[in-house]
Image: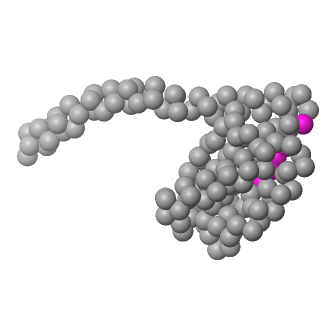
Amino acid sequence: MRHYENLIIVKPTLTAEEIKAQLSVIEDIITSNGGDIVARDEMGMRKLAYPINKNERGFMHVIYFKMEPASIAEVERRYRINEELLRFVTIKYDSKREVTAWNKLVEKTTQKPEAKKEEAPTTEAPKSEEAPVTEAAPATETAAE
C-alpha cells in the first residue's frame, strides 16, 4: 500500500450538516476502494486565493490514507462526479523520505486536538487578569469629570 494525502475543498454554500455528510461520503469512497484512513484534518472555512466557480471561500479538509495505487483512479473519478466539491488534489508519497514526511504530518494532525485542550486553560487566565483593568477604567473617567 502507498501513502496518500487528499486535500478537498467543499462548496461554502452547504450547511454544517451537509458538509459533514459530504466528508463522510468522501471517506466512504476511500474505504470502499480498499483504503485505510489514518488521519483527518478539518481546516475549516477558508478564503480561497482565487474564486472557483464564483466561490470566494471553501471548506477545506485533508485526509491522510493508505491505498493500493490501482484504486486511486476510481477514487478520483468519483470525486469528479461529486458536484459539491470545488477542488481536490491527491498527493502520493513514494520515496522513504516522503513517507517519513507523511508520518510526521500524520503525527501533527493527530496531536492537534490535544494541543487545543492544553491551550484552553492558558487562554482563560489572561481573561481574568484583564477583567480588573476594564473595571478600573470607568472609575478614572468619573474622577476626570
Is 21 situated above or below 31? Answer: below
Q: Residue at x 62, y 69 (%)?
A: 55
31 or 114, which lies in front? 31
Q: Nearer the viewer, residue 93 or 69?
A: 69
Answer with the quarter of the image where residue 89 lies: bottom right
Please name whichever residue, 134 or 139, is drawn nearer the observer in this view of the structure: 134
- In the rendered image, residue 81, in percent from the top left (x then y), is placed at 75, 68
For residue 125, say whether it is visible.
yes
User: Where are the magenta residues, as a range?
Assistant: 89-94
Question: Does 26 lie within the magenta span?
Answer: no
Judging depth in this view, the residue of 133 and 97 nearest the camera is 97
Residue depicted at x 56% and y 64%:
12
x and y, in percent, of residue 73 in the image: 86, 56
Regarding residue 46, the answer to whether it shows in the image is no
Relative to 68, 14 lies left or right: left
Q: Main secondary structure of the magenta part?
A: strand
Q: Position of residue 24 (x, y in %)?
A: 61, 53
Instruction: Tally the marks.
Output: 0
Q: Would you say residue 93 sits in the magenta stretch?
A: yes
Q: What residue is at 17 percent from the left and 36 percent from the top?
A: 135
- At which x and y percent is residue 133? 23, 33
Who's the residue at 83% across and 31% down the image? 99
Quarter-wise, where is residue 108 in the image? Answer: top right
* 74 sits left or right of 59 in the view: right
- Residue 39 versus residue 31 in the image, above or below: above
Asked whether, in this view, residue 47 is left or right of residue 29, the answer is left
